[in-house]
Structures are given as structure tokens and as C-alpha cells.
């Protein structure tokens, strides 16, 4: 299962809790760095190109959770997207020291459902949860629920940031 979402939506924070609960969670950014699979640096966007096919081959056999903002591009059965109100997300990214333009670019990507659209192009079951005000414990419960087979409750299409887009455009 992939746990994905726009930067700042809380993937790593949730993953720490999941590991504490005994689940195997792989940090995809860490794996890419460790295996020397970070490609070219894009100075304008302050990110690295990554070949997700190569990353896929580095994953161990068996069942696991993979977390990272590219994890929905791997060959996974289920994708859980953490969503966050773009206004809250922008604030979180600013607080993290992101450049103003990069914070807005990421918040805009969240408002435009960029990761959701990418994930829906795969064959995986795609689920999403609004993590704006959910605690880490709430989110860990969502993951447990999904691992136990719940799909309907977290189906896509219920999260809509178009009001924010209207404000911003
Ligand atoms: N459930 C939550 N509620 C409130 N704040 C949260 C929650 N989860 C994470 N945060 C805060 O949001 C910020 C980003 O969290 P985190 O690093 O887990 O995001 P991420 O999705 O892993 O980001 P990236 O893609 O850049 O690795 C942190 O400051 C963290 O404290
Ligand atoms: Mg992270």
C-alpha cells in the first residue's frame, strides 16, 4: 500500500506512528537516496527527478506500506492519499521554511487534485482521507481500517478544494 499526498500533508508523521504500531513502512525518499536513485536536481522547483520503475525494483518482497509523495507511482495494490486544506498546507510549508512560491505551488497542486489524478491513472484501488484536522491516531486508525478491508468509507470524490481555487484564481 502506498501512502502519498502533496508535501506537508503528514505522510512521515503518520508513518512514524504506524512503525510504532509494528507495521513495516518504507520511506521512499530515503530509499531513493540510499540506492543512489536521485536523478537530476531541478533548481527552480528544488526537487530531484526520480525514476519510479528503478525504485520499484528496490522494494523488498512481501507486504508493506511505502510512504512518499511519489509512492502512488509504484506498483502497489492500494493508494491512500492524505489530503489537506490548501490554505492550511501553505501555512505548514511556510512554517517549514519553504520559499513562498514553492509553498503556494504545492498548495495549488493540492487544490487541483494533482496526486489524485495521477493515482487514478494506475490500476490500484485509490482512497483518500482529509488529514487537515485529523490527529495522527485518527489517521493510523484509518490505515488499520483499510488494511482490514474497508474501501468504501475512504472512496475518492468527497474532498473538494474548488472553493480555495476560486479564492486564489
Ligand atoms: N495530522 C497532523 N495534524 C497537524 N499537523 C500535522 C499532522 N501531520 C503532520 N503535521 C505537521 O505537518 C508538517 C508536515 O508533516 P510531514 O513531514 O509528516 O509531512 P510529509 O507529508 O511527510 O511531507 P513531505 O512530502 O515533504 O515529506 C509537520 O510540521 C508536521 O508537524
Ligand atoms: Mg515526509
Image (cartoon, helix red, strand yellow):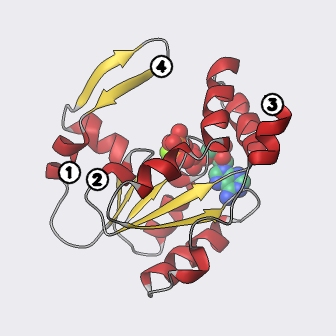
State the residue in front, 166 or 102: 166
Q: Nearer the viewer, mark 2 or mark 4?
A: 2
Query: How far is disc 2 from disc 4 in space, using C-alphas?
Result: 22 Å
Tell me residue 43's x, y (percent).
44, 12
Q: Is mark 3 within 8 Å of ligand 1?
A: no
Q: Residues within 10 Å of mark 4 (few under 14, many from 20)?
A: few
Mark positioned earlier in the residue sequence (1 or 4): 4
Q: Which mark is residue 46?
A: 4
Q: Are marks 2 and 4 in contact (CB under 8 Å)?
A: no
The N terminus sits in image quarter:
bottom left
Helix, strand or loop status at disc 2: loop
| Residue designated by label 1 | 56
What is the residue that sits farthest to the right in this orientation? 167
| Residue designated by label 2 | 74
Helix, strand or loop status at disc 3: helix
Mark positioned earlier in the residue sequence (2 or 1): 1
Q: Nearer the viewer, mark 3 or mark 1?
A: 3
126 on left or right of 130: left
Mark positioned earlier in the residue sequence (3 or 4): 4
Q: Residue at x 63, y 55 (%)?
A: 83
| Residue designated by label 3 | 168
Amino acid at each position: 500500500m502506498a501512502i502519498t499526498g502533496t508535501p506537508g500533508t503528514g505522510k512521515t508523521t503518520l508513518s512514524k506512528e504506524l512503525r510504532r504500531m509494528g507495521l513495516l513502512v518504507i520511506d521512499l525518499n530515503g530509499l531513493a537516496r540510499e540506492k543512489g536513485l536521485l536523478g537530476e536536481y531541478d533548481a527552480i522547483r528544488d526537487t530531484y527527478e526520480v525514476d519510479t520503475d528503478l525504485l520499484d525494483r528496490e522494494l523488498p518482497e512481501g507486504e508493506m506500506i511505502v510512504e512518499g509523495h511519489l509512492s502512488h507511482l509504484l506498483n502497489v495494490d492500494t493508494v491512500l492519499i492524505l489530503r489537506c486544506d490548501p490554505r492550511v498546507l501553505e501555512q505548514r510549508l511556510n512554517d517549514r521554511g519553504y520559499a513562498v512560491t514553492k509553498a503556494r505551488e504545492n498548495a495549488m497542486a493540492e487544490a487541483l487534485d494533482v496526486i489524485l489524478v495521477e493515482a487514478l491513472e494506475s490500476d490500484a484501488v485509490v482512497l483518500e482521507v482529509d488529514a487537515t484536522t485529523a490527529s495522527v491516531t485518527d489517521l493510523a486508525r484509518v490505515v488499520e481500517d483499510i488494511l482490514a478491508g474497508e474501501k468504501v468509507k475512504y472512496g475518492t470524490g468527497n474532498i473538494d478544494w474548488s472553493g480555495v481555487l476560486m479564492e486564489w484564481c
